[in-house]
Structure formats: structure tokens, C-alpha cells
Image: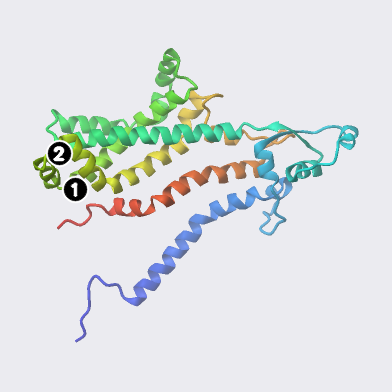
Amino acid sequence: MSAHSVTEPSPASKWIAGILVGLYAVITLIPLIWIISTSFKSGPDSISYPPKVVFQPTLEGYVNLFTTQSRPSAEDLARLPAPTTWYDRITRERGMIISGPSRFGQRFLNSVIIGFGSTFLSIFLGTLAAYAFSRFKVPLKDDLLFFILSTRMMPPIAVAIPIYLMFRQLGLSDTHLGMILLYTAVNLSLSVWLLKGFIDEIPREYEEAALIDGYTRFQAFYKVVLPQAATGIASTAIFCLIFAWNEYAFAVLLTSGNAQTAPPFIPTILSVGGGIDWPAVAAAATLFLLPVIIFTVLLRKHLLRGITFGAVRK
């Protein structure tokens, strides 16, 4: 009888699993591929029926996204000098001229500031709180942990009006600081619970050895615990950033100009004629995906280790 491992899959199982994973990847990537392809379509091609799969690519959507345009009369257009840049030529071919930059760049920068700022604060405060809950005897610890978790049970609309009134009284409406504090408060429950689980898996003997060697409690935390919890911190940071980056309800209610992020701005992108400019919307969505994708790819090894951390106990 030949030896057979119960943990090693058979070749047929590997083939079936590979095919299923490949099909799942293709299905999930179809919307993303469609958005990216739409960003390179012209206006008529983006709304054609049946939808065009083969089309002449153009950067019209990206030009419309980053510029504001106007339609001069035929006489005024004829008197204008020949276009000198590629984006001027694209707009001139449609009988338009560029009158200035759009507001998308500022909205995208607001998303970067608020998203990464709130993620940093959530991880910083969540790590300290998780360490305290994991290592010290905190009175009513279980009750406090449940109270922290309960903040995630309420839908955003349930607290939107009270938060709006509070922010208006404090002067935090439509400010970067107000949105960073709000997203930090929402993400803090997630970061505390995830990081506490990771820190619980780090043996206390490491810190005890450091304390015996003369380290202070803070030095033991900084030089021993944090490096061991790096995988958990990285994976938690990804989840916090995804929430802050994609959040829509609070951004619509609490921002309008100075601190407005990209999610509430993208659906309002209109063409000169007044309809929705679908190539520009698709271009904005494509660019909006890039920071989170890059951030996740950079931390992908930590993310995989963080998801499986503590799954097997020795």
C-alpha cells in the first residue's frame, strides 16, 4: 500500500481548485475592467447600445476630469490659435476650449489627507488601547470591549444628524480635522479588537525577558511587542484605510467644499451639455482605486500573515 497524506491534495483537487479560483478572479475583475475601459472611451462610445467592446481609445475622459471646458461660438473658435498641447487638441476636436482646472485634484487630495490621517490615528490609538486591554487588568474590561464594539452596530445615518449638529457647534463642519476625528472614532473599534487579538498571541515571556534585562515597560513595548505585531498592524491599517477611503454618507452630510472627498464628488461630474460625463466618471473611479491598490500591494505579505496569524496553535 502506498502512503497517502491526508493534508496533501491530489493533483485533480489542485486542478479543480485552480480552475475555480481563476473563474472567481475573472468574474470579480469584470466590473473593474469595464470601468477602466470606459475611462478610455469617447462620450458616444460610453453610452452606446449594445455596449462597445472594441473601440478607438482616447484620453477624452481624463482631460474632461482634470479641466473645465466651455463651448465657444464657431466664429470665436475659428479665431483661436492652433492648439499646442495634446489635451488642447482633444478638446478642440469636439469644438470645446479649456477654461481652467477642475476641482477633482483638490477632492482627491482631501481623500488622501483624511484617509491616511484617520488611518494613522486609528492605528496609533488602537495599538495603545489594545496593548492595555491585552496586558493589564483593566476594570470592567469585557464591558468596555463590548461598548467599543457596539459603536459599529449602528448604521451611519442613525448618528449623522447629531454629529452634524455637534460639528456645527464646534466649527468642525467641512474641515479636514473634523473628518479625520470622525473616521478615527469609527475605525477605532475595529483597530482595537483586531490588534488585541494579535497582541494576545505574542508571548508575555518576551516582555518579561526584556524587563529583566533592564528595559522599561515602554521600551519593551516599543522594541519587543511592536515588531512582533507588525503583521497585525499592517492588516488592520488596510481595513481602516479602505473604510475611510470609500466612506460616503458622512462625507456627503458634513463636507461641501473645503474638505469634500472624492466619493461624493465623482457622481456629480457633468459634461458641458449637462448630462453625466461617463468617461470622466470612469476615469475618476480608476484613479481613485490606485492609492488603496498600491497600499494593499505594498503590505500584501503582512496582510496574508495577519489574516492567518494565530490560526494554528502549538
- Residue 190 in the image, given as x and y percentages of width and height: 31, 38
Residue 85: which numbered mark, if any? none
* Residue at x-position 20% and y-position 57%: 312
- Amino acid at pointer 2: Tyr
Give the left or right position of residue 255, taking residue 195 as reference. Answer: right
Horizontally, residue 3 falls left or right of residue 176, namely left
Residue positioned most to the left:
212
Mark sitting on residue 201:
1
Q: Residue furthest bottom?
A: 1
Could you tell me which secondary element the residue under label 2 belongs to?
A: loop
- Mark 1: amino acid: Glu
Residue underneath mark 2: 215
Residue at 47% of width from left, 48% of height from top?
293
Quarter of the image that includes the C terminus = bottom left
Residue 73: which quarter of the image? top right
Give yes or no for contact between labels 1 and 2 (Cβ–Cβ under 8 Å): no
In the rendered image, the quadrant that contains the N terminus is bottom left
Sequence-wise, which precedes: disc 1 or disc 2?
1
218 shown above or below 36: above
Residue 99 appears left or right of 311: right
User: Horizontal placement of 227 versus 81: left or right?
Assistant: left
Closer to us: 149 or 91: 91
Q: Tell me residue 196's x, y (percent).
A: 23, 40
